[in-house]
């Protein structure tokens, strides 16, 4: 009788899965982060993506159906088309890139969620101004798949990371590292932002007070749109390490996708840090908060995250270190917790918005705020406005004058500044990038987002992208704004020419054909145009010449610091 080793058998099973799995799902960045933490134990006790019963239990009670505390739903969202091609019991491939499976999932559940209910339960609101709510409502697939991971393509590590490999430790590796150091207490610090002096003072105090080893555990998965990308942040973290004692601190990267869910997310982060071998966890005043909405209202009350996590600290088995904001006192040249500032002393502060503006303006950053080496790294990420790339995104009805004005702006910008200019016209995008797409709502969204991706790459590399597209749907324009503002500046220009004038200008007869039903889904006739809420500029080309429109746009760019404020003849 021939004996087969367990390893050989497992490889044979994986080969069989590869051969017989007919369906694959290509994972997006959030799903890839979730899968990595499922596989490496960071999401323990999860062994796959939540099924419907667990999902609903998490929403209603922050617990899995077996009673285990777990506040954030970890689901595999897919399109309706993909969901309809699957069946319960089927094993599917999960891919990082096309035809490159990294894991296999046995499907246990397929369902269509109530996303408004999910947003209300997880975030406490359905207001799409907040990042996490907007993502759930507008960026997730319409169906969810639940199931257990039943194999991977690489028994050691199905995820290949080629950057900062020295700082990538999974839970088992971190626990072994702490054991080797001989430390029994480890306090973790979560961050998705660069660390400055206030963060240094806070973490150093916490470590010394507890006599604990400090784990700087920054997020390097998907974060809030507009955050500093992780490569720059990790370089900043490396610059700050020498200010600690070498034996007192460890830097390790956490491949997690932020939800910006405030208190629930803080609780989730505490559970994850326990899985990574930490005994203590620092919680800030607005941990994982999404910021303010369009009316300036914050989603959560100050210290609400601390209160929720403290409530469950014993159950989790990790001690919570709540902290007040650290502030700099000029007279003493030192930092104090905000509630311990001596009476009558002057507090200095620089907000995140002020700091980014100072970087862009090339202003000197005081050393009390941050370390010089950190500032140098960030200056590379935030070049002065005159060197920063930007996108001018013209939107409006067909015939509004978008392309004509865009061409005029491109010509003038070529004259008065040195950055490379690329025009992304709607008709040319259709011809060269989106030939296979029709004019359904789904395909029009894909078309606009493709243009946004190209514009982002141009902007990221310091160029100027000028887009002229109908782009009828708000969510697509918001999506493009978010991805481009992460690398430069998105400037929305709404060309608000009235529909009747657009019809008069229509030399191709498109409006007439649309009215006759010959052209379906035509914006302004049989499909709506969603007017921008807060464009940077709104121009009615029915009452202004092209030259006047050009003057308005150039004046805005001067005032905003994107071109030199010099006198040019019009």
Image: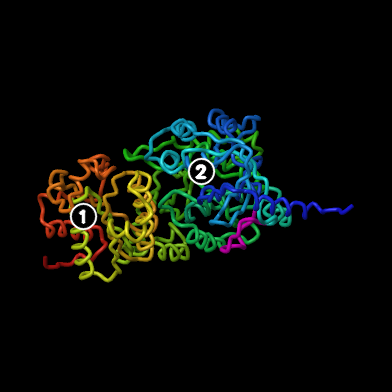
For residue 182, side relative to residue 564 (left or right): right
For residue 75, side relative to residue 333 (left or right): right
Q: Is residue 102 magenta?
A: no
For residue 17, side relative to residue 359 (left or right): right
Q: Nearer the viewer, mark 2 or mark 1?
A: 2
- The residue beneath circle 2 is 82
Most prominent secondary structure in the magenta stretch? loop
Secondary element at image label 1: helix
Q: Nearer the viewer, residue 174 or 345?
A: 174
Outermost residue, right side: 1
How many residues crowd around disc 1 within 10 Å: few (fewer than 14), some, or many (20 or more)?
many
Spatial distance from mark 2 to mark 1, Cα to Cα? 37 Å
Q: Position of residue 383 (x, y in %)?
A: 36, 64
Please tell me in which quadrant of the rendered image residue 434 appears. Answer: bottom left
Q: Position of residue 507 (x, y in %)?
A: 15, 53
- The residue beneath circle 1 is 402
Q: Which mark is residue 416?
A: none
Q: Is residue 169 above or below residue 416?
A: above
For residue 70, side relative to residue 511 (left or right): right
Task: Please say if the residues under marks 2 and 1 sit with CB atoms less than 8 Å apart.
Answer: no
If you read the primary sequence from the N terminus, does the residue marked by circle 2 or circle 1 appear first? 2
Q: Nearer the viewer, residue 333 or 212?
A: 212
**Residues shaded magenta:** 157-170
Q: Is residue 162 magenta?
A: yes
Q: Is residue 275 above or below residue 88?
A: below
- In which quadrant is the C terminus drawn? bottom left
Q: Is residue 249 above or below residue 264?
A: below
How many residues crowd around disc 2 within 10 Å: few (fewer than 14), some, or many (20 or more)?
some
Residue 409 is at least partly visible in this image: yes
Q: Nearer the viewer, residue 185 or 430?
A: 430
Please tell me in which quadrant of the rendered image residue 69 appears. Answer: top right
């Amino acid at each position: 009788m021939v004996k087969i080793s367990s390893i050989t058998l497992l490889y044979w099973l994986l080969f069989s899965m590869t051969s017989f799995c007919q369906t694959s799902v290509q994972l997006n960045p959030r799903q890839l982060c979730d899968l990595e933490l499922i596989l490496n134990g960071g999401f323990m006790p999860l062994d796959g993506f939540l099924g419907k019963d667990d999902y609903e239990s998490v929403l209603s009670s922050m617990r899995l159906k077996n009673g285990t505390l777990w506040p954030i739903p970890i689901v595999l969202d897919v399109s309706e088309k993909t969901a309809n091609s699957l069946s319960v019991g089927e094993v599917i491939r999960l891919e990082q890139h096309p035809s490159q499976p990294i894991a296999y999932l046995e499907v246990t559940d397929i369902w269509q969620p109530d996303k408004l209910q999910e947003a209300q339960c997880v975030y406490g609101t359905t207001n799409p101004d907040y990042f996490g709510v907007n993502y759930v409502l507008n960026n997730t697939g319409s169906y969810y798949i639940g199931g257990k991971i039943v194999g991977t393509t690489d028994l050691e590590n199905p995820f290949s990371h080629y950057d900062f490999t020295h700082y990538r430790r999974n839970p088992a590796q971190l626990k072994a590292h702490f054991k080797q150091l001989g430390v029994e207490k480890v306090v973790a610090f979560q961050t998705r932002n660069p660390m400055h002096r206030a963060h240094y003072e806070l973490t150093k105090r916490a470590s010394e007070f507890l006599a604990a080893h400090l784990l700087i555990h920054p997020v390097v998965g998907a974060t809030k749109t507009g955050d500093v990308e992780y490569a720059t942040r990790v370089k900043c973290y490396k610059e700050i390490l020498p200010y600690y004692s070498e034996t007192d601190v460890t830097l390790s990267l956490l491949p997690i996708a932020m939800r910006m869910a405030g208190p629930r997310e803080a609780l989730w982060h505490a559970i994850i840090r326990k899985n990574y071998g930490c005994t203590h966890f620092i919680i800030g005043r607005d941990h994982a908060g999404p910021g303010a909405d369009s009316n300036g209202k914050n989603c959560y009350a100050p210290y609400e995250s601390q209160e929720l996590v403290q409530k469950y600290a014993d159950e989790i088995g990790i001690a919570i270190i709540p902290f007040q904001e650290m502030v700099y006192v000029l007279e003493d040249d030192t930092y104090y917790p905000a509630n311990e500032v001596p009476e009558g002393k002057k507090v200095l502060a620089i907000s995140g918005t002020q700091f980014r503006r100072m970087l862009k303006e090339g202003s000197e950053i005081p050393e009390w705020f941050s370390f010089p080496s950190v500032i140098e790294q960030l200056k590379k990420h935030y070049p002065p406005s005159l060197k920063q790339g930007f996108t001018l995104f013209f939107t409006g009805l067909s015939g509004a004058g978008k392309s004509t004005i865009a061409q005029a702006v491109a010509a003038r910008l070529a004259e008065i500044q040195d950055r490379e200019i690329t025009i992304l016209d709607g008709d040319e995008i259709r011809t060269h990038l989106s030939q296979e797409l029709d004019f359904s709502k789904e395909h029009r969204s894909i078309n606009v987002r493709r243009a946004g991706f190209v514009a982002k790459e141009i902007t990221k590399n310091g160029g100027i992208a000028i887009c002229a597209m109908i782009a009828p749907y708000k969510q697509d324009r918001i999506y493009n704004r978010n991805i481009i503002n992460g690398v430069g500046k998105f400037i929305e220009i709404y060309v608000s020419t009235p529909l009747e004038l657009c019809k008069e200008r229509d030399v191709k007869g498109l409006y007439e054909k649309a009215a006759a039903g010959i052209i379906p889904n035509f914006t302004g006739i049989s499909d709506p145009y969603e007017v921008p809420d807060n464009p940077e500029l709104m121009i009615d080309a029915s009452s202004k010449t092209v030259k006047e429109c050009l003057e308005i746009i150039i004046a805005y760019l001067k005032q905003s610091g994107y071109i030199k404020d010099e006198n040019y003849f019009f």
